[in-house]
């Protein structure tokens, strides 16, 4: 079962993000859960969440103004999410293989560097394996011929994920896993440096903030991690003085960045707000709204998506469930990852949601770190 579990980790991180792969990852995850189950957790909360989402779904189906526009994706994804939440429990845990984590790390970072430095043979191979659409070209096809160009070219490397925000989300979670395995101090410093450079090259401000918070979580729990935190701080300062990278441009995130781009979705939520949508939500999400509006609509925030789909009650219950699960699982340094729900997707990113639950429900690490 240990080999199967680590194969699943490789699959969720590295296989192409298409529906077939999502289904395979989910089936393998459920297979492992079945064979490691001991008892369920938080059944009152999970059952209440099931009732809320079922009622929200029924009302959406019965609404003649919505029924015709309902997207299949907006039906199946919440159903799968609810199913996973109902399976939250105590499972016999499986040790994460650090060699697997190092392999995933090297693969992801090299895929990002291949696009940034325009290594054509590698990028063409990636393009042949990992599908992408025209909208993603803007994320991937910005290469440089010299490191000095980092100060003048708006580099946003997303590697095999294409989208740099998505890349930073997976890389930060991978970093959490790496920090939980036993590593010698000098290897830990080297890996942290590599991850920091890779995060900076995504241009993701949220990614950089979460990376720093993960290391700050180490700073507050282990004395020998304070040197690592100071080291990362010095590196960030030195790079910020030498290169003009989007990750350091925090102010534009408020004036013209992604936070501003979420205002239309807030406006849509406010216009749609009534007693039902406030408390139990509308069940449907972005795809159905896009059908209704006849144009592309994005919440680009899990908090907004959850509130719109499952209402205030659903949002509060999910928050309680995963707050309790974080304490129960005792996976170190993982809490900052949930900040991605503000500016990205966790629950409504199905592959990532599977990955989070794989770690919280099944992952086990050796308790002591080598120094």
Image (tube, grey):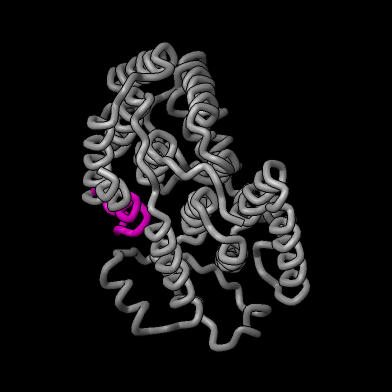
Percent x, y for residue 356?
43, 40
**The quarter of the displayed image where residue 217 is located:** top right
Magenta region's main secondary structure?
Answer: helix
Relative to 30, is 260 above or below?
A: below
**The quarter of the displayed image where residue 154 is located:** bottom right
Left or right of 121 in this view: 356: right
Left or right of 287 in this view: 334: right
Percent x, y for residue 51?
36, 13
Kindly identify the residue that appears in the image at 30 percent across and 54 percent down. 11
Q: Nearer the viewer, residue 139 or 146?
A: 146
Relative to 226, is 110 above or below?
A: below
Kindly identify the residue that appears in the image at 34 percent across and 31 percent down. 92
Percent x, y for residue 287?
36, 41
Kindly identify the residue that appears in the image at 52 percent across and 42 percent down. 367
Q: Quadrant of the C terminus?
A: bottom right
Q: Which residues are magenta?
A: 9-19
Q: Nearer the viewer, residue 71 or 313?
A: 313
Can residue 136 be seen? no
Q: Nearer the viewer, residue 202 or 218?
A: 218
Left or right of 153 in this view: 66: left
Percent x, y for residue 365?
46, 44
User: Is-magenta flag for residue 10?
Assistant: yes
Can residue 58 be seen? yes
Q: Nearer the viewer, residue 140 or 369?
A: 369
């Amino acid at each position: 079962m240990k080999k199967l579990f680590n194969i699943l980790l490789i699959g969720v991180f590295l296989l192409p993000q298409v529906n077939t792969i999502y289904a395979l990852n989910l089936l393998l995850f459920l297979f492992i859960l079945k064979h490691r189950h001991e008892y369920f957790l938080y059944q009152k909360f999970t059952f209440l969440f099931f009732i809320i989402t079922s009622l929200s779904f029924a009302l959406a189906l019965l609404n003649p103004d919505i029924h015709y526009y309902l997207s299949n994706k907006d039906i199946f994804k919440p159903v799968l999410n609810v199913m996973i939440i109902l399976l939250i429990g105590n499972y016999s845990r499986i040790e994460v293989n650090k060699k697997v984590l190092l392999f995933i790390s090297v693969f992801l970072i090299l895929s990002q560097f291949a696009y940034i430095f325009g290594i054509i043979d590698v990028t063409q191979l990636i393009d042949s394996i990992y599908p992408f659409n025209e909208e993603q070209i803007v994320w991937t096809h910005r290469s440089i011929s010299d490191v000095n160009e980092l100060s003048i070219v708006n580099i946003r490397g997303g590697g095999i994920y294409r989208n740099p925000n998505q890349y930073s989300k997976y890389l930060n979670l991978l970093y959490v896993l790496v920090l939980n395995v036993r590593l010698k101090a000098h290897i830990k410093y080297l890996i942290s440096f590599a991850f920091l450079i890779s995060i900076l090259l995504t241009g993701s401000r949220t990614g950089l903030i979460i990376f720093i918070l993960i290391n700050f979580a180490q700073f507050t729990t282990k004395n020998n991690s304070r040197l690592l935190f100071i080291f990362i701080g010095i590196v960030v300062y030195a790079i910020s003085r030498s290169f003009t990278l989007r990750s350091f441009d925090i102010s534009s995130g408020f004036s013209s960045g992604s936070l501003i781009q979420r205002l239309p979705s807030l406006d849509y939520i406010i216009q749609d707000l009534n007693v039902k949508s406030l408390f139990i939500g509308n069940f449907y999400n972005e795809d159905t709204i896009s059908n209704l509006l006849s144009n592309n609509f994005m919440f680009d925030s899990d908090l907004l998506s959850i509130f719109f789909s499952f209402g205030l009650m659903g949002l509060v219950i999910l928050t309680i469930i995963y707050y309790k699960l974080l304490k129960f699982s005792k996976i170190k340094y993982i809490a900052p990852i949930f900040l991605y729900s503000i500016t990205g997707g966790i629950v409504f990113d199905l592959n990532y949601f599977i990955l989070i639950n794989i770690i919280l429900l099944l992952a086990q690490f050796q308790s002591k770190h080598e120094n």
